[in-house]
Amino acid sequence: MFDFAVIGAGVVGGLVARELTKYKLSVCVIEKESDVAMGATRANSAIVHAGFDAKEGTLKALLNVRGSEMMEDVCSELGVKYKRNGSLVVGFNDEDKETLLSLIERGRTNGVKGLSLLERDELLKLEPNIGDGVTCALRAETGAIVCPYELCMAAVGNAMDNGAELKLNFKVEKIEKCGGVYRISSENDTIEAKIVINCAGVFSDEIARLVGEDTFSVRPRRGEYMLLDKECGELVSHTVFRCPSKMGKGVLVSPTVDGNLLLGPTAEDIDDKNDTSTTPAGLAHLSALAGEQVKGIHLGKVITSFTGLRATGSTGDFIINSPIDGFINCAGVESPGLTSAPAIAQYVVEMLKKAGAELTKNESFNGKRRPLHYFRELGIDEKNEVIKNNPDYAHVVCRCETVTAGEIIEAIRTNPRPTSIDGIKRRTRASMGRCQGGFCTPYMVELLAREMGLPVTEITKSGGESYINVGKTAKGGN
């Protein structure tokens, strides 16, 4: 029996679980996939939005600004990379300029600081590679970038280090309430909890319907991205957006916290909640729009493309409520969901307190977490000292990203523990470089098999039946 069950191990679910472990509560996080951060958290724009876009008086506006203000401290506590690089929303004509002025007014109403309108000559001083057709831009000084899946893994891991339990491969099929307790069942397992928090992303409406709540629906909005090599990472320093539309904040061109250049997303409403395919038309559209915003984008340097699905709710706002006693929705959390996630976690606890829940502070809570990327940031003398104590750190496995065997082994032993090659990839960046795993994957397979006590033929790329090796090709070989 748990006090709380959090359904969904994305960034919202992870930060909600972490917030709950600040109190003397038993918490279980359940996730249908084989790892955390496998939904919208895995593939999004990685932007900490300033908060000028959300409509005044909405939960999006309130929690965006609050989350933006919290994010730097949260990332610092969890050892997650964060950079306040600022945002620019570019305009191409007088109509766009009027839109930007209205966004500045809205942002100031929402409580956003550091907003201004730049004319082209001022803009070029900040971004010399801005598109030739750009005439003006909104500048948001508080805009920032972060790594979303790194934040999620750190939040879930910190919650686990503070007593929370994580159940993976747990696809919720039934929720029953018996005597004031919720019984949550998958095909092979059942847990009980006094309170359920629904953070299931694009599937949150389906989870809500299991308890008879059908007042909203969630539709996936597909967004396609392209990621360029690190040699392109300094083409712009700010995150460069287009004027927003009813479909979202538009295509962006942005550096990442790891030094790459990111283009995207497109915006297409679809019906299939599992369709994360990229399309030739979508990528062509993306490249054309991005090229209008920033000149000099070298599409020959694209190292990968991917698609994310945003959980677009039918209400037009975040759906954070408790329609049934003991059941809380955190649904329809599309952009600015990543930015808002720390504030959503606080908001849920505030809801519980207002409802009369007795929450006793957990005096032993430790919100600090050492970053998994600490080794590569050490000085040469410090690295040599680590290597002296553990020679695994001297063995570079991923040459593109300079990731060592020591870092991979440490990641495998750290909550939440990865069980696939993609799991290691998200934690260490091994295989995220130019060769996309062409050289380092065999070594990663060997390390994961050894640490898990499994034959190499049981190691998967991304869980399920995505096996990498099927047998030996020669006597004594793999």
Image (cartoon, grey):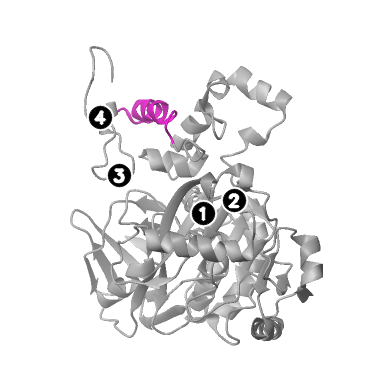
- Looking at the image, is mark 1 or mark 2 earlier in the sequence? 2
Amino acid under disc 2: Leu
Amino acid under disc 1: Ala
Residue at (22%, 55%) from the top-left corner? 189
Q: Position of residue 427 (x, y in %)?
A: 49, 42
Q: CA distance from mark 2 to mark 3?
A: 26 Å
Name the residue beneath numbered marker 4: 457
Name the residue beneath numbered marker 1: 155
In the picture, which quadrant includes the C terminus?
top left
Give the number of the mark in front: 1 or 4.
4
Name the residue beneath numbered marker 3: 463
The residues colored magenta run 437-454
Q: Main secondary structure of the magenta part?
A: helix
Name the residue beneath numbered marker 2: 78
Q: Secondary structure at mark 2?
A: helix
Q: CA distance from mark 4 to mark 2?
A: 34 Å
- Looking at the image, is mark 3 or mark 4 earlier in the sequence? 4
